[in-house]
Amino acid sequence: MTETRAVFVISVAAELAGMHPQTLRIYERKGLIDPSRTPGGTRRYSQQDIVRLQLIQDLTGQGLNLEGVRQVLELQEENNRLKKKLALLRDQLAILEKEALRRIDARDRAGRHETSKSRKG
């Protein structure tokens, strides 16, 4: 099973997260969790959703209200997006650096070739 595959019904998800099913509904209404839905409208939760629910529970246990939790979750998501973008930019920079070095090397070799031709001629 993949982390994002939504397989758990609300009662199982609530049990795995250590909370009441009504709490999951409240979190959904507040926009803290967005479970998948079957064609019939039944909520389905993934392992990733369970981890998020446990994080919400940890944060509220530390005294954050739900608005504070929402802000923390948004900041974490933004941080993850920025980390991915940074990794992509680093990869692109490495490619550009290799290409620049290749061009410098080719130019240097061409310059040495021209110098040796002019000495012979």
Image (cartoon, rainbow, N blue to C red):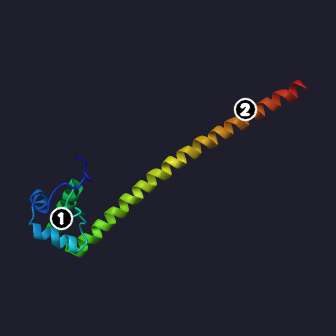
Q: Residue at x 68, y 40 (%)?
A: 104
Q: Residue at x 11, y 70 (%)?
A: 22
Secondary structure under tag 1 reads loop
Instruction: Give the amino acid at mark 2.
Output: Arg
Regarding residue 63, the answer to whether it shows in the image is no
Number of marks? 2
Q: Is residue 31 above or below residue 17?
A: below
Q: Nearer the viewer, residue 39 or 88?
A: 39
Can you give x and y, in whole percent of width and height, for residue 17 in the image?
Answer: 13, 59
Query: Label 1: which residue?
Result: 42
Q: Farthest residue toward the right?
A: 121
Query: Label 2: which residue?
Result: 109
Q: Nearer the viewer, residue 77 or 28?
A: 28
Position of residue 52 in the picture relative to residue 104 (left or right): left
Secondary structure under tag 2 reads helix
The quarter of the picture where residue 35 lies is: bottom left
Q: Farthest residue toward the top?
A: 120
The quarter of the picture where residue 9 lies is: bottom left
Can you give x and y, in whole percent of width and height, for residue 99 in the image?
Answer: 61, 42
Instruction: Give the amino acid at mark 1.
Output: Thr
Real-space Cα separation, disc 1 to disc 2, in angstroms: 68 Å
Regarding residue 39, the answer to whether it shows in the image is yes
